[in-house]
Image: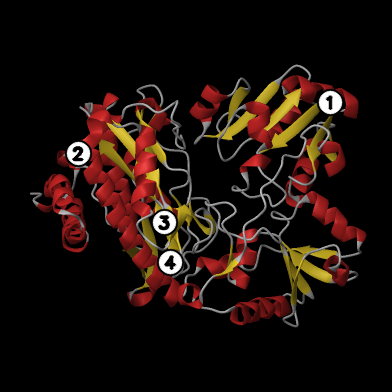
Amino acid sequence: MITAIRNFLKQQNIQALIITRTDSFLGEYYPPEKNQLLLATGFSGSAGMAVVTLNRAVLFVDARYTEQAKSESQFEVLEIPTQTTPSEWLKNNLPDTTIGYYTEQRSAAWVSYMTLHLKTAGIHLKGLPKKIWETLFTPQNEMTPPDEFDYDLSYCGLDTNQKINQVTGILKEHHLEAFLFASPDSVSWILNKRSLWVHEYPVIFKRLIVFADGSYHFLSEDTIKLLENKTIGADLTTLSQALCERLKNENVRIQNIPDVVAPLKAIKNQTEQNNIRQACLSESIVICRFLAWIEQSKNHITEWDCDIKLQQLRSENPLYRGDSFDTIAASGEHAARAHYHATEKTATLIASEPLLMVDTGGNYLNGTTDMTRTICTGKPTELMKRRYTQVLKGHIALTQTKIKSGDLPRQLDQNAHSFLRADGVDYLHATGHGIGMFLDVHEAPPIIHEKSDTPIVAGMLFSNEPAYYDACEGFGIRLENMILTQNGEEDFLNLENLIWVPFDGRLVDFSLLTVDEKKWLQHYHQTILDRIVPCLSSDEQKSIRPLLDFFTQIQ
């Protein structure tokens, strides 16, 4: 593939080509036949960007994927932002050149930002249209999308007219004639439609125009003409450069406004809250059954077997429609890659290493789930126990954070990091992300990060997942639950935990825990004993009970 790319550079008279992992909807999840970054680099992670020149091939990834990228790709791997950023690297290494990119797969916001920053180094960005790009990446035979279906009011709580009224109210505030929604999850949320084309992302892959008078149309070559000479809002981070240029050809005036649906769907209504509680309760039972199976079978099962077992357990629920992402079942050095995914060929026996990290989730009609546990499968080192305990203390600290409605998530994030940072180590990803309602498992807002500028308010659903990764020692630890914010007293928010799955006392250094932390763990595991254990078989109860006893009998 690299030879074909370099021949393409010569044909197009450009000195470098940018290749990204996305499609024309610019999302994380899309049909697998569209993964051109994988085809070019061999890297299978969910985020990354490559730059190919006549004599270099560089792959940019964030800290979640550094080790995975190095193992999967022959490209030179650079971690962002710790080593560099794409814009800085391009300026330092490719001054006074022309660099090509695909206009269907880069947002208008990205093009504007990069054009401005690269100009100082004399770099010209050249947008390549579809007909030229497809001479390099020949279109694959795509599956016929499955039928769309209505997302029932008993799950979503608001009908489309109610949601359209919310949108038109915002349009009038901004004095806009229409808003173009280019994000599939926003379109699916507004219309209460879903599809199972991509099991991790059960959306309809369409764009929607909503007018200030309440009328709405899917975007097409016919309906785009309805926008001629109008002033509309659009989020340029979700709008491809190709579509932006097409709109300008129709004399459409675009105001760059963040997707107005994003904050609406981030706040779950009462119906959604009730449903996600039930989904998480069902998921907690699944994971406890899974942990019992691990305890019974750990000496002869692989990482791949864990993935299959979780799917089997979930499939017993009639509301299950697929996993919300590919399960991360990772032992040893595999867990040092934050988003490793086992295959039958790469999977190792879980008993071959002291720790197994399992990050997994399901898409159910009544909600999307995401949780992580790190499980003892052998004899842990003292360092492993120390790091596990520090991550656990950070997890508890987030749940106990006192924040008011409207506060930024800075304190949540800093509390989760604090015990690792005090020991001179850290993790580099956000502590949490929003979670959609049978939508995107990685929803934003909110983002639980110390630099996030989105306030936390009641009704938000997000993950709590502090972590630690050690590539040198060959292990990784992550502990993740789901949190739902509720109104408390005096404008404070209550952080309601939704996942009820044991932590692993075999990995805890109890001497590092405070009295309050021990009380929290005791109450948490007593709740599991009361709510989850009665739903398990007698054999499952027997296997999981020792995990609970570490904490229910804590002194």
Rendered view: 134 above or below 227: above
Which numbered mark, 1 or 4, is in the foreground of this view? 4
Residue 28 percent coordinates (x, y): 60, 47
Q: Which residue is mark 3?
A: 369
Quadrant of the rendered image containing residue 206: bottom right
141 sits to left or right of 423: right
Q: Which residue is mark 4?
A: 366
> Residue flagged by tag 1: what amino acid is it?
Leu
Rendered view: 66 above or below 312: above
> Residue flagged by tag 3: what amino acid is it?
Thr
Q: Residues within 10 Å of mark 3 (few under 14, many from 20)?
A: many
Is residue 440 visible in this depiction of the protein? yes
Could you tell which of marks 2 and 1 lies nearer the N-terminus?
1
The residue located at (73%, 22%) in the rendering is 2
What is the C-alpha distance between the residues marked 3 and 4?
A: 10 Å
SS type, badge 1: helix
Q: Which residue is mark 1?
A: 9
SS type, badge 3: loop
